[in-house]
Amino acid sequence: MSAVQAEALRKTFGNVTAVEDLSFAIEHGELFGCIGPDGAGKTTLFRMLTSLLVPDAGSATVMGCDTVRDYKQLRRRIGYMPGRFSLYQDLTIEENLAFFASIFGTTVEKNYEMIADIYRQIEPFKKRRAGQLSGGMKQKLALSCALIHKPDILFLDEPTTGVDAVSRREFWEMLRRLKEGGMTIVVSTPYMDEAGKCDRIALMQKGHILGIDTPDNITGSYARPLLDMRGADVYRLILALREFPHTHSVFAFGESVHYTDSRSSADPEALAVFLRSRGFANITIEPIRASVEDSFMELLEQHDG
């Protein structure tokens, strides 16, 4: 049996459908990512998988436990780190950790080796209150508290949101080491660049899964010719490209524009001529390989179409 098995999960809040007919499986030892913007349904999905929400329809099992019927047993076997920092701000680092260990009938001393690699980085500050910690230190404390009872599977809901780039990189390195130790990890993130750190990803939008596969397979299935264009005025460049007769899509990507052609192959020279006729000079046009974000935008267009 898979570590996670979801069948036609559905959850609504009033007139809003947060999750619609989601079915998927996550294998043991896998680092699985749910990738999507705010409002994609990631948090609602995680709360159903961790027994905090009851689905309106469908069912799910986590480590063989039904998320509704076996919720008491399930909660002893999972580690859950919610998106918002939820530890006690007035307690110190060591007090928070001791408290969460006691909830699960264990102690920090008994399971120290489980968190040692992470906890050692903040242990010198163990007398500091949680509310006084930096974003990166809060992140490490929350992960330590989620691991202190030696869970079989770890759910992390947007764990790197709001932390600096160095802390993000350190956090993913910690997850890599946990995975190497056999931990099954399910993580959500709005950052498309983090998708490549997962074994498989589910691209989510408005409660639906647009695609689910390895990052390489998702980007490799991008079928349209894709060009990266750079010029002095990105906004004006986008407006001009929308008037080109063979444009399929055009999106801003930082300081550049990603253009896809409606034909089976693009003609960079014809595009350059067209743009020069619209007053653009010194435009660079280069074929590129699709990123996860490019693939997400294409899948979203297919879904909405």
Image (cartoon, rainbow, N blue to C red):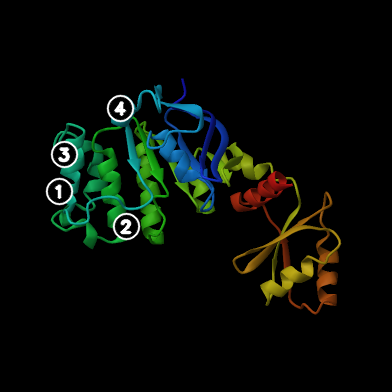
The reply to whether dot 2 and dot 4 touch (C-beta < 8 Å) is no
Q: Residues within 10 Å of mark 2 (few under 14, many from 20)?
A: many
Residue shown at 32% from the left, 53% from the top? 85
Horizontal relation, residue 47 to residue 14: left or right: left
> In this figure, which residue is indicated by the disc labeled 3?
108
Q: Amino acid at mark 2?
A: Gly
The reply to whether dot 4 and dot 1 touch (C-beta < 8 Å) is no
Residue 69 in sight here: yes
Label 2 secondary element: helix
Residue 112 in sight here: no
> In this figure, which residue is indicated by the disc labeled 2?
136
> In this figure, which residue is indicated by the disc labeled 4?
72
> In this figure, which residue is indicated by the disc labeled 1?
95
The reply to whether dot 4 and dot 3 touch (C-beta < 8 Å) is no
Label 3 secondary element: loop
Q: Residues within 10 Å of mark 4 (few under 14, many from 20)?
A: few
Q: Amino acid at mark 3?
A: Val
